[in-house]
Structure formats: structure tokens, C-alpha cells
Image (cartoon, rainbow, N blue to C red):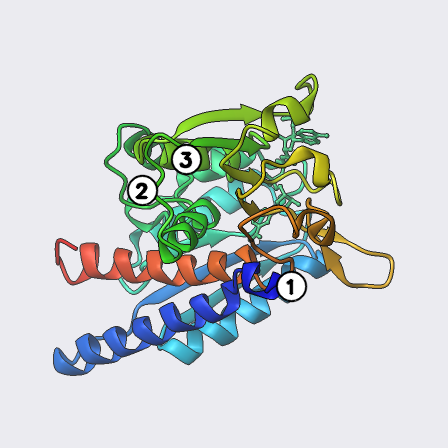
Amino acid sequence: MENQKILNGSLLARKIMKNLAVNIDFYTRKNKLRKPALCTILVGNNSASEIYINIKNKQATNIGITNINFNFNKEISEKELINLISKINRDPQIDGILVQLPLPRQIKTEKIFETIIPSKDVDGFHPNNVGLLSIGKPIFVPCTPKGCMVLLKSINVNLIGKNAVIVGRSNIVGKPMAQLLINSGATVTICNSKTKNLKDFTRNADILITATGIPHLIQADFVKPNSVILDVGISRLANGGITGDVDTYAVLPLIKAITPVPGGIGPMTLAMLMKNTWIAYKKYYLNLSS
Ligand code: NDP
């Protein structure tokens, strides 16, 4: 019974990928076109980023997306990186650009986001795409919040009139998540590290989305009975495993559904990256409207 409350993000992500693979194969074969191509830029040698990119490469290849990878040492200057991105922006063989975060200190992340041409911004971080999302007309939605919304839809959560509380206000998770929930008719509260009495807010959440990276911040007394919880946080444990922001086994008897870590939002994020690459290819290479 309790196990049925655990939302299997890996399974849903696999279904989405399978569907994408069929579509990619159909369009490219039928029209004798090149495959969609995703370019990934990694600066430095962060081992977590390297693992993520290897998984991403494997999954992209499996569904017929071509990988182009650039790997620079951490000394690269902001100007060099901008020049490279400008070149990729003009390359008609590339549909999507992903710059792996974090970047070294000499490079301003916002400047890099602004350099990626909006039509290849599969992460949805360019100010144009951020603006389109905020007025409810998104093209590229950031992959993690997009994955959260797809998961909620998969279990038929009606967001209209619901209290949604987001813990974390980053530009890549918390803020776009809030926009998506607002656009879906939820009443949205965003908390941060300065929020006083966090549980006063979270206990009121029909939908709780937490993205802090603080292991087990959310305990049983933080949750509303029968709520749905999406645990975005990822923290590395001393034994090499990973855990989320929520003490899953403490909250499980109370709540309706929760995403596990690992196997919840992580695989959905990757699936959405592939989906956004496919959207870029269809919209700007095939000139199809949806
Ligand atoms: P950031 O560090 O940019 O943001 C963390 C947010 O959490 C900040 O807004 C911070 O508040 C808030 N916060 C920190 N401590 C508390 C606290 N005690 N109470 C309330 N709020 C708090 O991280 P990201 O948004 O990039 O990522 C968040 C987590 O999600 C990380 O663990 C990351 O690894 C994971 N992640 C997982 C993904 C996935 O695919 N599953 C994808 C992306 C991220 P303040 O702004 O005041 O500092």
C-alpha cells in the first residue's frame, strides 16, 4: 500500500523516451533528414557533471538524438566560451545547447544563458524564454519543473484552487516551477532559506515541491495529510548514495504520493531535456508548429 504512494519517475521517463524515439525515427526516416542534435558544454572536471553527461549521452543515442560534446578545462575565459557558443548558435546542424552547471567563478552564468540563442535554449534559461513562460506562452520550459508538471499530470492532479508550496527559489527550479503552477491555476507560495517557520507554510500545501539540497529538511510534521510531494533535492551521502530533501519514510503514512530520490524527478528531468531538443528540432529545423 505505502509503495503505491511512491511515484515511479524512472518508469514514466522511459515511456516518454520510447515515444520520442518512435517520433524521431518516423520523421527523420520519412523525410530523409538528419537526426536532432544536442550540444553539451562542460567546463572543468566535476565528477557529478561527468556522470550526468555520460547518462545523458547514452539516453540521447538510444532515442536517436546525436550528441556533440565540448569539454574545456576550468581555466577557459568567459570570452572564449561566449565565442564558442556564438559559433554553435550559427551551426545549422545543432538544435539544442546545454551548458552544464556549475561554471567556474570567472564565467558569469547569466551571461552564458544570454549568449545561447533562444531557439536552441533547450534548458529554457535565456531571458526571452523565461519571459515567455512568465506570460504563459512558453516555448522551452526548464527541464526539472517541466518534469514535475508532467508527473503531476500523470497522476491526474487538478491544480486549480490548490495550495502549492515550493521550497527553494532558484532560477532553474523554484521560480520556473512557480510560474508553471501559477499558469495552472494553483495558489503558489515560494519559501527560501530566510523563511520564518517553514512548516507553517509547508503544512498548508496540497502540493509540496522541495528543491533545497538539504537532506531530510522535510519531516512528518511539515506535511499536510493526503498531500502530493515532489522531492527535487539531491544530496550525496557519505556512502556514495543520494537522498532527497524529504524524510520519505517519516512522511509516507500521511501523504498521498511522493517522488523518490533517486528514481523520481531526476529521470524526468533528462526526459524533458530530450523532449525540448525534439521541440527545437521540430520548430526551428522542420518548421512544424508543435
Ligand atoms: P540552489 O542552491 O540554487 O537553491 C536552493 C534553494 O533552497 C535556495 O533558494 C535556498 O534559499 C533554498 N534553501 C536552502 N536552505 C533552505 C532552508 N533551510 N529552508 C528553505 N529554503 C532553503 O539549488 P538548485 O535550485 O539548483 O537545486 C536545488 C536542489 O535540487 C539541489 O539539491 C539540486 O541538486 C537539486 N536538483 C535536482 C534536479 C533533478 O533533476 N532532480 C535538477 C536540479 C536541481 P535562498 O535563496 O534563500 O538561499
> In front: 148, or 289?
148
Mark in the foreground, 1 or 3: 1
**Percent coordinates x, y for residue 209 in the rendering:** 54, 40
Instruction: Using the numbered discs, state the Cα–Cα distance from disc 1 to disc 2 in whole angstroms.
Output: 25 Å
The kind of residue tagged 3 is Glu
Question: Considering the numbered disc 2 on the image, is that residue within a helix, a strand or a loop?
Answer: helix
Q: Is residue 38 above or below residue 252?
A: below
The quadrant of the picture showing ligand 1 is: top right
Q: Which residue is mark 1?
A: 50
Question: Considering the numbered disc 1 on the image, is that residue within a helix, a strand or a loop?
Answer: helix
Question: Considering the numbered disc 3 on the image, is that residue within a helix, a strand or a loop?
Answer: helix
The kind of residue tagged 2 is Pro
Residue 118, label in figure: 2
Q: Earlier in the sequence, mark 1 or mark 2?
A: 1
Instruction: Using the numbered discs, state the Cα–Cα distance from disc 1 to disc 3 in whole angstroms.
Output: 24 Å
Q: In which quadrant will I find the C terminus?
A: bottom left
Looking at the image, which residue is at 65% across and 52% down? Answer: 252
Q: Quadrant of residue 162?
A: top left
- For the question of whether residue 170 can be seen, the reply is no
Label 1: how many Cα within 10 Å (few below 14, some 14–19, many 20+) = some
Looking at the image, which residue is at 20% across and 61% down? Answer: 282
Q: Which residue is mark 3?
A: 114
